[in-house]
Amino acid sequence: MDIVANQSTAAASFPPAAAIAIGATIISLAALSLLHMVSPEFAPSWRMVSEYANGRYPWLLTLMFIGWAVSSFALVAALWPLSATTLGKIGLVFLALAGVGQTMGALFDINHKLHGPAAMIGIPSLCIAAVLLTMALSRRADVAAPPMWSAHLPWISFALMLGALAMFMSALKSAGVDVTAQTTPLSQLPNGVSGYVGWANRLLFASTYLWAALAALSVLKARA
């Protein structure tokens, strides 16, 4: 009875930050979608999302990163009762780190030396957090946890993106293009080179949006 009571109290203590997380996720998704519409010069098949910083609407990219970061930080608050367990505590730390990396992405665009570290902090941290926090939620009797496949999608997408990036760089090298010697981004691909790293990059964003929304919805359902 005490365990059940404690679980009910924890569920009731979930803050309304879950609604903020959903709203921020929608804003981030909307900004990313608009970037595709207003900046068609960036081929989504091989241009990374961060390259929109060199387009005509860099503020939309900043808004996208801010929404992404707010979503992560809001989820930390919404899922705070999970800090009572070791698994949940570790997951929340990684989710907070993801928010830090996403905030850095908003402050430092692709032309800044800190953009790379921002990605290396934010993306892996979010992938780890999604798995750990979903596992922690699944162990609670008072919350309908997101499906486990939604937690695995981010790291699978990240792995696909890294693989696609490696193949893309190899194809460019075979075509005689030295990316490290380029002073400006490529405007078009050499003949015979095709890239899919852009799609993998966008799949990563879509998968993280999906998990964040499902995790926040599980909190709202628990409150209801």
Image (cartoon, rainbow, N blue to C red):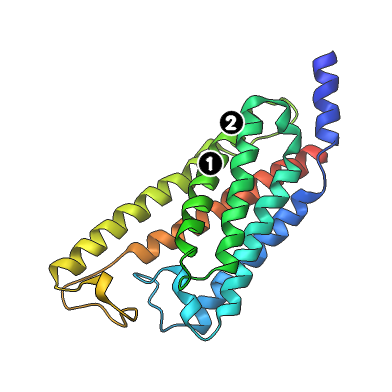
Q: Quadrant of the N terminus?
A: top right
Whether residue 174 is situated above or below residue 138 in the rendered picture: below
Give the residue displayed 25% in from the left and 74% down from the top.
Answer: 181
- Nearer to the camera, 208 or 147: 208
Report x, y in % for residue 135.
58, 31
- Nearer to the camera, 122 or 24: 122
Give the residue displayed 49% in from the left and 64% down from the top.
Answer: 115
Report x, y in % for residue 124.
48, 47
The amino acid sitting under disc 1 is Ala
Question: Do the numbered discs 2 and 1 sit on residues whose CB atoms are within 8 Å?
Answer: yes
Q: Is residue 154 left or right of residue 141?
A: left
Q: Quadrant of residue 48?
A: bottom left
Sequence order check, earlier mark of 2 and 1: 2
The residue tagged 2 is 135
Q: Is residue 150 left or right of residue 181?
A: right
Q: Is residue 18 left or right of residue 172?
A: right
The disc at residue 143 is none
Q: Quadrant of residue 133?
A: top right
Q: Secondary structure at mark 1?
A: helix
Whether residue 16 is situated above or below residue 60 in the rendered picture: above
The residue tagged 1 is 151
Residue furthest to the top: 1
Q: Secondary structure at mark 2?
A: helix
Report x, y in % for residue 180.
27, 70
